[in-house]
Amino acid sequence: IIDACRRMNALGINQGTSGNISLRHGDGLLITPTSTPYETMTPDQIVFMGLDGTHAAGQQRPSSEWRFHVDIMRSRNDVGAVVHAHPTYCTILAIMGLEIPPIHYMIAVAGGDTIRCAPYATFGTPELSAHALTALEGRFACLLDHHGMIATGSSLSKAMWLAVEVETLARQYHGCLQIGTPPLLPS
Ligand code: 13P
């Protein structure tokens, strides 16, 4: 998890202490602690949470986004890892309230012919989690309005791979929009 966090920042799809990562583990999940620099994060700071959203006393505080991590793991048996980041191009589109349409056939790697943008809700709230779950229906990734992106996968390496692909699609769409209205592929 810590390696993935550091890679997320090195790849340029996230910055600072933004973002968070979880991985299904036993009957719960392991999740990054809140507001902790990835360069100095140590394995003992990773928090184990039950699928009921509880964690043992004495551990670090889990990511402020633990709700959507827990809710995704609880409702999606096909998901083993969740990567949340603030990639620049995904976030630009999300600020503008745009979903990513089928501009390139690689859109299909997220599970359908669009990557939806979940409506805005304050970070860490049950409302944001509900919006994210809806936007993720039949998908492995979504944008979050005025916020960032969620990518999921059966494994952490697949979720990380998808996060990079989604940011690439967002960058391509942003580039197309500079020239005009891009023609779209059919479903
Ligand atoms: P945490 O440091 O609490 O994980 O929050 C970062 C973030 O990106 C919130 O959306």
Image (tube, helix red, strand yellow):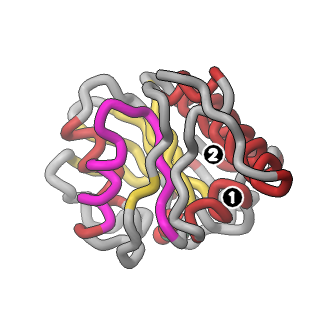
Q: Position of residue 5 (x, y in %)?
A: 65, 48
> Does the stretch in magenta take in 132?
yes
Up the image or down, 165 lies above or below 34; here it is above
Q: Which mark is first along the chain, 2 or 1?
A: 2
Name which residue type carries label 2: Ile
Query: Circle 1 sits on which residue?
Result: 38
123 on left or right of 2:
left
Q: Can residue 170 be seen?
A: yes
Q: Position of residue 118 (x, y in %)?
A: 39, 58
133 on left or right of 150:
left
Res 136 quadrant in image:
top left
Query: Mark 2: which secondary structure?
Result: helix
161 on left or right of 117:
right
Q: Quadrant of the N terminus?
A: top right
Q: Position of residue 128 (x, y in %)?
A: 32, 66
What residue is rendered at 82% in x and 50% in y?
175
Name which residue type carries label 1: Tyr
Res 96 quadrant in image:
bottom right
**Image: magenta residue range:** 128-145
* Residue in the foreground of this view, choosing between 60 and 76: 76
Query: Circle 2 sits on which residue?
Result: 2
Quick check: is the Cβ at mark 1 less than 8 Å away from ligand 1?
Answer: no
Up the image or down, 14 lies above or below 115; here it is below
What residue is rendered at 67% in x and 64% in y?
92
Q: Can residue 44 be seen?
A: no
Q: Residues within 10 Å of mark 1 (few under 14, many from 20)?
A: many
Query: Mark 1: which secondary structure?
Result: loop
